Amino acid sequence: MGKPPFPPSNTLNAPPSWRCIDFISDLHLHEDLPLTTAALAHYLRDTSADAVFILGDLFEAWVGDDMRHQPYEQACARMLRDFGQRRYLGIMVGNRDFLLGSDMLTDCAAHVLPDPTVLSAWGQRALLIHGDELCLADTDYLRFRSQVRQPAWQAAFLAAPLQARLAQARQMRAASQAHQQTQAQTAWADVDEAAATEWMRAAGVDCLIHGHTHRPKSESFGPEGGIRHVLSDWDLDHGQHARAEVLRWQAHGFERMTLS
């Protein structure tokens, strides 16, 4: 796949009152992850952050905003709304929940966070993306992404009854889990550095923050002097691989916090 051109980006200027900004992504929430869901609730209740940015894949699957009336999703909306009514909550869609729409975001008291967004704080600028669009080696996924991001495809899919869409989502989740088990030893596609560098230069930033790849790290990347912070996925329900991290940004720099 060719390098995608840098799309028009949203710019968000942090207000002077903000002292602490947190970034999370890839929680993949669903009702079979009670410990992960509870960890998010505790984190949102207790965090000292003035703003929380969720950079995609908040939910494992999202088949339309009428899904928000399901019991588990209703509970998630209440949890998010409790935070969003007190602090700034920004939500970016990912590859699993790209159909997350304005009705659910309103119920969550959340702000739409376009992909990409340039965040300016403390005289610094960071480019925020989910990351899937720049995994250029994952050609099968990018073909699928191109199809399902088309308005005509989405309209046809959303026209189906909710229960049919939920059944399809369960089938896709089962297939995804089986694929992950059989491909456990295969390296996942990473964000293409050359393409990301072009985006960073176009945005006028030397800092990139993204999720999607489930390989948390902070490293030199992109333009000379550039850095990227890859966010952790969350999963506290499978002990062997349990993890949940928050990337915190303050005036003095970045730090990673591990939640237990």
Image (cartoon, rainbow, N blue to C red):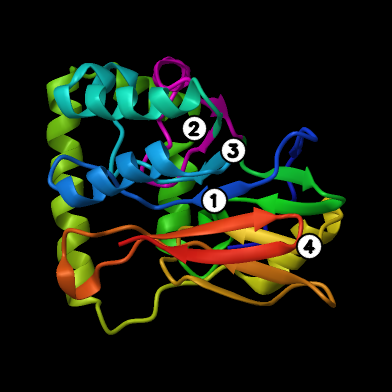
Q: Which residue is drawn at 57% across and 28% down?
A: 112
* Marks 3 and 1, the one that precedes in the sequence: 1
Q: How crowded is mark 2: few (under 14 residues within 10 Å), some or many (20 or more)?
A: few
The amino acid marked with disc number 4 is Glu
Q: Between disc 4 and disc 1, whose residue precedes?
A: 1
Q: Are marks 4 and 1 in contact (CB under 8 Å)?
A: no
Residue type at mark 3 is Ala
- Tell me which amino acid carries mark 2: Gln
Query: What's the CA distance linking mark 2 and mark 1?
Result: 28 Å
Q: Disc 3 versus disc 1: distance between alpha carbons? A: 9 Å
Residue at point 83%, 54% (across, down): 124
Question: How crowded is the residue under tag 4: few (<14 C-alpha within 10 Å), some, or many (20+)?
Answer: some
Q: In which quarter of the image is the N terminus?
A: bottom right
Question: What residue is shown at x 71% (from left), y 71% (from top)?
Answer: 227
Tags 2 and 1 touching, CB below 8 Å: no
Residue lying at the far bottom of the rendered structure: 185
Residue bearing the label numbered 2: 150
Which one is closest to the eye, mark 4 or mark 1?
Answer: 1
Which of pointers 2 and 1 lies earlier in the amino acid sequence?
1
Q: Which mark is residue 198?
A: 4
Q: Distance between the residues labelled 4 and 3?
A: 28 Å
Q: Give the residue pinned by disc 1.
A: 23
SS at mark 3? strand
Query: In the image, residue 43 lies at what x, y percent?
Result: 38, 45
Q: Give how far across and how far down residue 207 sits, in percent.
A: 74, 62
Image location of residue 14, percent across then percent down: 75, 37
Residue 66 falls left or right of residue 117: left
